[in-house]
Amino acid sequence: MSKSITRRDFINGVAIGTGGLMLQACGADKGPSALVTTQAPMPFSPPGIDQYYPPTLTGMRGSHKGSYEVAHALAWKGQKPAQYQTLDEHYDLVVVGAGMSGLAAAWYYREKMGPEARILILDNHDDFGGHAKRNEFHHDGRMVLSLGGAQNIENYTSYSQSSAALLNGLGLTKDVLDGIRENTPNDYAMGGNYDAQNSMALPGANGHVVRNGNWVKMLHGAEGYVEAIRGLPLAESEQDKLIDFVGGERDYLAELSLSEKYDYASSVSYNQFLVERVGLEEGTLPLFSAWLMVYKGLSGWNLSVLEAIVSGAAGLRAMGWLGGLVDSLSVQFSESLLDVRMFPDGNASIARMLVKQLIPAVAPNMKGVEDVAISRFNYQALDKADNNTRIRLNSTVVGVREKPDNKVHIDYVKEGEPLRISASHCVLACYNGLIPHLCPELPEAQKEALKYGVKVPFVYANVLLENGQAFSKLGTSMIQCPQDPFQIISTAPTMSVGGYQPPSKPEDPMAVFMMSSPISISQKGVKGRDLLRVGRHKIYATSFADYEKQIRDQLQATLGPLGFNQETDIKAITVNRISHGYAYQYLALDDPEWPEGKAPHEIGRAQFGRISIANSDSEARAFMDAAWDAAWRAVEEQTSHSPA
């Protein structure tokens, strides 16, 4: 998720500014206020127990039971049904995947071809949104929202023309987005407010040692870092090395020229630098990895020094890069990189707004941005025969092929029943690695390219608590836990956006949001893609009972001294397995620099007749606008350059 830094960028000081985003307090400017929500919340009651409403389901979510078995049988064993019932359904466009890219493809197609276009979106999950899932709890008459996956609208001012048009088409204008930012509390660290306090928790002799402060900034030498490091349960000699490193007392690459520093920083792993140059013990390295693990999905063993620092890791002060450009560039880049907007259920609200525009009957009374977070959605309306656009959930596609009659036949399995439909065009907005199994007629080089990238796996858990009393005593909204199963513990989003009123008092029910990368933080000498595969299988092999124990133990160790009792305070747990997570972004230590047009994601996304590919994998960027850009490209291929 980091920006690529060239040798010229580096020497001109751009790397200094980007990596230095944490060096000083750089609060984001508040834009003009937009009326996002300043009124009392609209009435909302949970759906009836017999109503199909996936956001309120707890237990194992994300890659839930029923969502992956058919696809795994196809990809792992080559198994799929031999015969299909052909439905009397033909569409102008069939989209495979109801995530951000798939929903956007339907939106762009309707915009270009008109609202009468017949569109069907198929998805293997029981909810739409892909990684942008909504977790919704109800307790004591209150609704509590949290993040089931993708969270942020980042750097919207740099969106392409097509992605910006989609933002605006949803009502997310600059004034509205600035209003969302304004309604994000300054003490909510996950909302991009890096002046917010955040704690560090490490195992100690008698349970966890929790140290408050702004650890994100103190690990970059901000005020108070010496006292903070002295408070960690580490040997004094290790503390001394940390203080020298964080404070920039030495240039650990002093003997190298600026050009040589670039070569070193691009070719040596961050953890190798910490061990060999800084002299830290390997047991100390997790201190710098919690953020990297949840941001990049890999530890410092798989990221170059430059990749890690551009992603926010400490070390800029320790490499002799603090010239006169730091002050100006750190401000410039921090304003860009901290330009985050968030709904209380993350990007699920954006998926909901897309679905509302495609199928108005799902929420006929919903106005838009101002009430998206609290509007009730009628999932029964998604797949009505009289809809021009339909979304069909719990439907795993197993075959897509172009036929001589200028049609594309799409085979899928819905609740065990093999079915077949046809379309004039098809957009595959699903996982790149599955596409060669769906379309075996693709050229071999394209199939190999599609298999190259490996999705970054994550686990996001949400825990409903009886109240927020223990967490309020902590005094921070986020805790880094580098040596625990979940590297980040945070309050669920606390912004008043989309009509939502978050918990306002310690006595209110609250949700705790927890983030985990399944990759071993100490694993070294293994390529990133291989580690990501191992992490994915680890997710599938871990039961809900195991996750529950991890969650209960970690929360008790962290919050127990503040009066928390996991046996009585936890009311519900939702575990979102994101086994095929965010798009693979090339790694400096593993991947070559391909000529333009020759990278695997570029070869893999080539149009194949009436079939086009749209997903963030095809852009090799794990951002919402990448998914949208891919959707726009695919629609353009099928409407402007497709075969007659």
Image (tube, grey):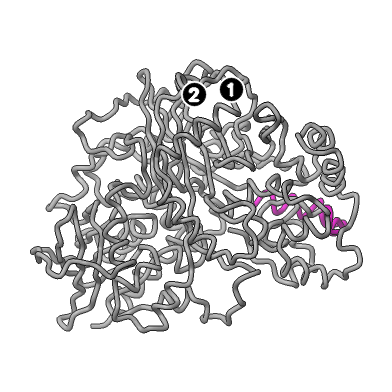
Q: Nearer the viewer, residue 611 or 442?
A: 442
**What quarter of the picture does the N terminus occupy?**
bottom right
Q: x%, y% of residue 348?
A: 40, 44
Residue 449: image tag: none
Q: Is residue 3 magenta?
A: no
Q: Earlier in the sequence, mark 1 or mark 2?
A: 1
Q: Is residue 299 left or right of residue 436?
A: right
**Which amino acid type corresponds to the residue marked 2 in the rendered image?**
Gln
324 falls in the magenta region: yes
Q: Quadrant of residue 233?
A: top right
Mark 2 lies on a secondary structure that is helix
Residue density around tag 1, few if under 14, some if 14–19, many if 20 or more, within 10 Å: some
Q: Is residue 397 left or right of residue 329?
A: left
Q: Are marks 1 and 2 in contact (CB under 8 Å)?
A: yes
Magenta stretch, residue numbers = 317-336
Q: Compared with residue 1, is residue 574 higher up or lower down, i.e. above or below? A: above
**Residue at the extreme front:** 205
Q: Is residue 72 above or below residue 82?
A: above
What numbered label is drawn on residue 560?
1
The one nearer the camera, 6 or 213, is 213
Q: Residue at x 77, y 50 (%)?
A: 281
Q: Locate residue 389: give its quadrant.
A: bottom left
Which residue occupies 17% across, 55% down? 416
Which residue is under mark 2?
566
Asked if residue 171 can be seen in this view, the reply is: no
| In the image: residue 320, left or right of residue 155 | right
The secondary structure that most of the magenta stretch takes on is helix
Amino acid beneath label 1: Gly
Q: Give the residue drawn at x 15%, y 70%.
A: 82
Classify the position of the C terminus by image quarter. Answer: bottom left
Q: CA distance from mark 1 to mark 2?
A: 8 Å
- Mark 2 closeness class: few <14, some 14–19, many ≥20 residues within 10 Å: some
